[in-house]
Amino acid sequence: MKTIKISIYYPVDKITVPLVSTLIKEFDLQVNILHADISLNKTGTLVADVIGENKNVDDALRFIEEQGIGYKLFNKQLIWHEELCVHCGACTAVCPSHALTMSRETWNLEFDKEKCLVCGLCTKACPLNVMSLQD
């Protein structure tokens, strides 16, 4: 089994391609959509976790390319050095997926790895550099 995190970029003329349903039906993949911004007459983006047999995932990536749709694989992971964090919340202001939030009870930073898009915005926002991206 292989799990990838992918960001898919739909050109305006490809918005109506039934991509996700094809990945599920034709390639026997699990697709967990984490974020999507897709509208008619505008470039669209979709971020998802994709899980399946290695060959099926590789075949699906080739299929996406053949459709004229672009993608980027997130090969990194966010490392949070919690013991050095002062829980200032600066990273929460730039986190598009709300993977980084402040607890309303303790006012401590909370990190939901499943929601993380590995965009790196938090690493730039952190005044103490306690966030980093690693392969």
Image: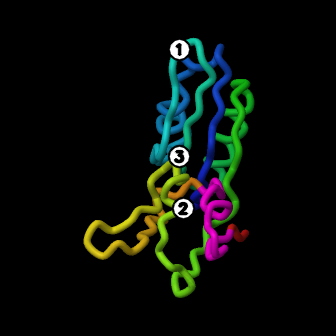
Q: CA distance from mark 3 to mark 1?
A: 20 Å
Residue 124 is inside the magenta segment: yes
Q: Nearer the viewer, mark 3 or mark 2?
A: 2
Q: Nearer the viewer, residue 70 or 90?
A: 90
Taking the image as shown, residue 49 lies to the left or right of residue 76, namely: left
The residue wearing badge 1 is: 40
Taking the image as shown, residue 86 lies to the left or right of residue 64, namely: left
Q: Position of residue 114 (x, y in %)?
A: 46, 61
Q: Which residues are magenta?
A: 118-132
The residue wearing badge 2 is: 91
**Residue plotted at (59% across, 27% down):** 44
Q: Residues within 10 Å of mark 1 (few under 14, many from 20)?
A: few
**Residue plotted at (53% across, 62% down):** 90
Q: Nearer the viewer, residue 41 or 16?
A: 41
Q: Nearer the viewer, mark 2 or mark 1?
A: 2
For the C terminus, which image quadrant?
A: bottom right
Above or below, 90 against 29 in this view is below
Above or below, 109 against 119 in this view is below
- Amino acid tagged 2: Cys
Q: CA distance from mark 2 to mark 1?
A: 32 Å
Q: Of marks 3 and 2, which one's residue comes earlier in the chain?
A: 3
The residue wearing badge 3 is: 48
Above or below, 133 against 37 in this view is below
- Amino acid tagged 3: Ala
Q: Nearer the viewer, residue 96 or 116?
A: 96
Callouts 3 and 2 close, C-beta under 8 Å:
no
